[in-house]
Image (cartoon, rainbow, N blue to C red):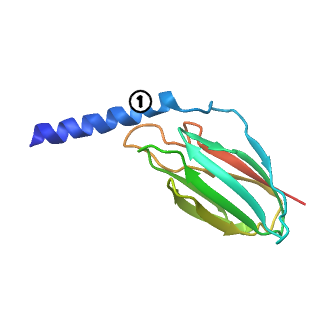
Amino acid sequence: MKRIALAVMLALACAFLVVPVYGKEKKGEEKLYTAVIDSDGVQRVEVLGGGYFFNPNRIIVKVNVPVELKVRKESGIVPHNIVMKAPEAGIDFEESMGSEPKIIKFTPTRTGKYRFYCSKKLLFFEGHREKGMEGVLEVID
C-alpha cells in the first residue's frame, strides 16, 4: 500500500514538473487588451489562464464603468485561480478557474494599477505567481 501511494505521489509530482515545458506563453511577454464599452454599458474582457500565464496579462478599463471578466483555464490537470485584492478600488475577488468560463463582475471606483495573479502553489515549489502567472489591471479616466 505504501508503494502504491508513493508511486502515485511521484507520478503527480512529475506531471506538475513537466507541464511548464509545454506552456504556449513566454514568461514576461506582455499581452495587452484595452476594454471597449459595449452598447449595454459594460466592459467585457476574456482572460485565459494556464501554463503559468494569463492572456491578456495587461488589461485597461475605464473607472466607474462595470466590468465583466470571463475567465477560464486551458485544459490540463494543473489547478489555477485568479485573485485581485484592491477593495479600496471596488475590486476584490478570488475565483478558481476551470475549462468552463466563469464571469466575475465588478465596477472599479478608483484609477490606478492593480495586480491580479494565481495564488496556487504545490508543496515546496515556487508558486504560480512567482513563475509569472500575474498581470495588471489598469483603471483609467
Residue at the outermost right position:
141
Residue 139 is situated, as x and y percent measured from the top left of the image, at: 81, 57
Locate residue 98 relative to residue 55 in the image: left or right.
left
Residue type of the residue flagged with mark 1? Val
The residue lying at 52 percent from left, 42 percent from top is: 128
The residue lying at 90 percent from left, 60 percent from top is: 141
Would you place residue 24 above or below residue 78 in this image? above
Locate residue 115 relative to residue 139 in the image: left or right.
left
The residue lying at 57 percent from left, 53 percent from top is: 72
Locate residue 29 relative to residue 109 in the image: left or right.
left
Locate residue 49 relative to residue 66 in the image: left or right.
left
Q: Which residue is mark 1?
A: 18
Residue 27: quarter of image: top right
Residue 48 is situated, as x and y percent measured from the top left of the image, at: 61, 48
Say how many tags the image has: 1
The secondary element bearing badge 1 is classed as helix
Residue 73 is situated, as x and y percent measured from the top left of the image, at: 54, 49
Would you place residue 78 above or below residue 41 in this image? above
The residue lying at 9 percent from left, 43 percent from top is: 1
Residue 6 is situated, as x and y percent measured from the top left of the image, at: 19, 37
Residue 105: quarter of image: bottom right
Q: Nearer the viewer, residue 75 or 79?
A: 75
Residue 56: quarter of image: top right
Would you place residue 40 above or below residue 111 in this image? below
Residue at the outermost top position:
21
